Image (cartoon, grey):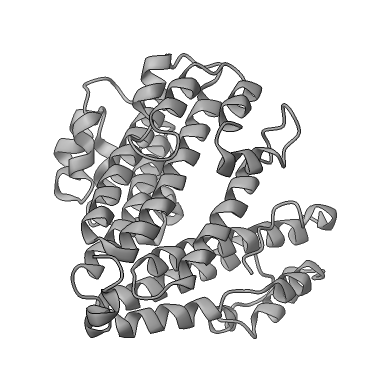
């Protein structure tokens, strides 16, 4: 029942909620980003990060630094925080934290399968996989020739197994089938996570269902824009949309028949929360849409910390750290390539 979490939440969740709020205090501020934008080299970036939570991770890295090293160490900080929380968590929080990693598992599966299709080295692909999405048999993904084999040989023993029921076919893997597989898996994953959060009830259900609905709507827009001009039929496009969210079901019906970006914009203008996102873009301009969605997501994630006694803060913290890593990667690339005039184009400020 909503409102009574305070009675029992701290018995199992109080310590970890305090920990995650402490982690959140270590996120970079606008002042930190202003300093980073003044950097002339990656060694300057390292020097500015020395006073932050990333300092110990970068301290022993020799010059010259590379962008990949900075991103790798930032990701390592996120993984260490996640693993610390997971080892301390009890049910149902431990299951909730495991759900957060499933999205990375899907991305890793798609990365390995796509790389194998293009005859890339498996060890090179494994290095590019996100650490949160690793599982024991991931290296053997390379042997699968179609989705049925992929499931039978590898994924049947992973948490992703239930999500594969909708996309098991005997068709050979190609780029189009792999993208359909990714989006079908994400649809099943988001719907499962949504049901789990509803079952938890209370403030967790209220806040998480809102965050997951936003994620589902964003994916629906991305699927629509990316499938314009491809051989994906309208019915196939509709099947990839999640069965919840602000756009479900009437917005999905309209998105399924959109043939260009301005039609997508026309559909989204009917929904006030998304109208404000598209209002930032010029007509026909889809390049900055990702940043506009990221800015809206960050705003919603920060609001999750305004309430206490719920699990959404753990989801919000992991997502904010991931956004911070994207920001640092953009800054590092701009500095390394001497493109400082573009440095503000890709940064999404968190505070």
Q: Position of residue 294 (x, y in %)?
A: 58, 51
The residue drawn where x is 21% and y is 56% is: 199
The residue drawn where x is 29% and y is 79% is: 6
Residue situated in front as seen by the camera: 176 or 32: 32
Residue 77 position (above or below residue 240) = below
Rendering quarter of residue 261:
top right
Rendering quarter of residue 279:
top right
Residue situated in front as seen by the camera: 88 or 115: 88
The residue drawn where x is 25% and y is 69% is: 93
The residue sitting at the right extreme is 341
Give the number of callouts. Answer: 0
Report if residue 88 is visible in the image: no
Q: Position of residue 323 (x, y in %)?
A: 56, 60
Q: Position of residue 225 (x, y in %)?
A: 55, 27
Image side of residue 156 versus residue 117, left or right: left
The residue drawn where x is 19% and y is 29% is: 148
């Amino acid at each position: 029942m909503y409102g009574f979490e305070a009675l029992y939440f701290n018995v199992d969740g109080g310590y970890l909620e305090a920990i995650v709020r402490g982690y959140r205090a270590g996120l970079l501020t606008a002042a930190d980003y202003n300093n980073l934008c003044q950097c002339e080299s990656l060694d300057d970036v390292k020097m500015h990060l020395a006073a932050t939570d990333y300092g110990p991770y970068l301290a022993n890295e020799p010059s010259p630094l590379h962008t990949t090293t900075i991103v790798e160490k930032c990701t390592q900080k996120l993984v260490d925080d996640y693993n610390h929380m997971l080892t301390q968590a009890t049910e149902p929080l431990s299951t909730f934290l495991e759900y957060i990693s499933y999205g990375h598992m899907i991305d890793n599966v798609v990365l390995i399968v796509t790389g194998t299709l293009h005859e890339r080295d498996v060890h090179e692909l494994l290095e590019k996989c996100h650490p949160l999405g690793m599982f024991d048999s991931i290296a053997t993904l390379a042997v699968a020739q179609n989705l049925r084999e992929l499931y039978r040989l590898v994924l049947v023993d992973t948490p992703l197994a239930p999500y594969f029921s909708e996309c098991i076919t005997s068709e050979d893997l190609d780029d189009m089938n792999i993208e359909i597989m990714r989006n079908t898996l994400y649809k099943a994953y988001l719907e499962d996570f949504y049901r789990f959060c509803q079952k938890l009830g209370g403030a967790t259900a209220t806040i998480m269902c809102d965050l997951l609905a936003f994620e589902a709507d964003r994916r629906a827009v991305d699927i629509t824009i990316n499938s314009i001009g491809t051989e994906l039929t309208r019915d196939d496009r509709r099947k990839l949309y999640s069965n919840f969210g602000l756009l479900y079901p009437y917005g999905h019906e309209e998105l399924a028949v959109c043939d260009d970006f301005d039609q997508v914009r026309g559909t989204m203008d009917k929904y006030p929360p998304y109208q404000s996102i598209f209002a930032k873009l010029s007509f026909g301009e889809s390049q900055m849409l990702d940043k506009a969605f990221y800015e809206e997501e960050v705003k919603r994630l920060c609001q999750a910390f305004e309430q206490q006694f719920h699990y959404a803060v753990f989801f919000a913290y992991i997502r904010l750290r991931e956004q911070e890593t994207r920001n640092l990667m953009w800054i590092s690339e701009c500095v390394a390539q001497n493109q400082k005039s573009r440095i503000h184009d890709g940064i999404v400020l968190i505070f």
